[in-house]
Image: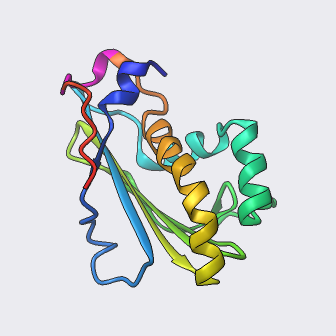
Amino acid sequence: MSRSLFRQVRRVEVNDELAVGRRFDYADAFELRLEAPDPVAPRSWLAAGLEDSPAVVQLLTSLLLGVRDEPATADELADWRVLESTPDLIHIERSLPLLHVVLIGRRLGSSGRRLTTLLSYERPVLSRLVWTVVGVGHRLGARRLICHGIPSATVVATGGADRAR
């Protein structure tokens, strides 16, 4: 993945219909706009991005969050439970010792992607403390994940500014 592609990912308001009205302790959303139609379904780019996590990320999430890889079943995607999967949406969740995590990958029209993360803290004090450290890596990883499998030539030039809210 090129740096220019990574810089095109913007942090946006969390307004996904699956997130509205839910209780969560932390939420973020990242969006990527493309010049050409995106032929890759959200399930594919999310699964490939999760499986392609750097070894150091896998080690840290294992140590800090209690993530353990287990064999996936037909209703799972890389150890995540699939709640809904269509050509334009993947909605998955995973319960960890400290957090309940929901990821929503969505195709935006024909030429964009959005990744929304929702967290519910299982042990609020410890979860907040750990998330203070892990959250920095998550935000970098979310940008990397949403770019998975896209050649940089298909990305709309927006100046690369990240608009955090």
In which quarter of the view is residue 77 placed? Answer: bottom right
Residue 99 appears in the picture as rendered? no
In which quarter of the view is residue 26 placed? Answer: bottom left
Residue at image location 48% in from the left, 28% down from the top: 149
Residue at image location 28% in from the left, 39% down from the top: 162
Residue 60's spot in the image, x, y percent? 74, 50
Horizontal relation, residue 147 to residue 14: left or right: right
Q: For this rendering, which residue is in front, 114 or 164? A: 164
Residue at image location 70% in from the left, 60% down from the top: 79
In the displayed structure, 152 sits above or below 102; it is above
Residue 87 belongs to the span the image colors magenta: no
Quarter of the picture holding the C terminus: bottom left
Q: Which residues are magenta?
A: 153-158
In the displayed structure, 43 sits above or below 54; it is below
Q: How many marks do you count on the picture?
A: 0
Residue 8 appears in the picture as rendered? yes
Horizontal relation, residue 45 to residue 155: left or right: right
Which scheme is used to colour this image of the protein? Answer: rainbow
Residue 155's spot in the image, x, y percent? 27, 24
Residue 6's spot in the image, x, y percent? 40, 29
In which quarter of the view is residue 81 placed? Answer: bottom right
Residue at image location 67% in from the left, 63% down from the top: 74
Q: For this rendering, which residue is in front, 32 or 64? A: 64
Q: Main secondary structure of the magenta part?
A: loop
Residue 121's spot in the image, x, y percent? 56, 79
Horizontal relation, residue 113 to residue 77: left or right: left
In the displayed structure, 128 sits above or below 109; it is below
Looking at this view, name the residue that lies furthest to the top.
Answer: 153
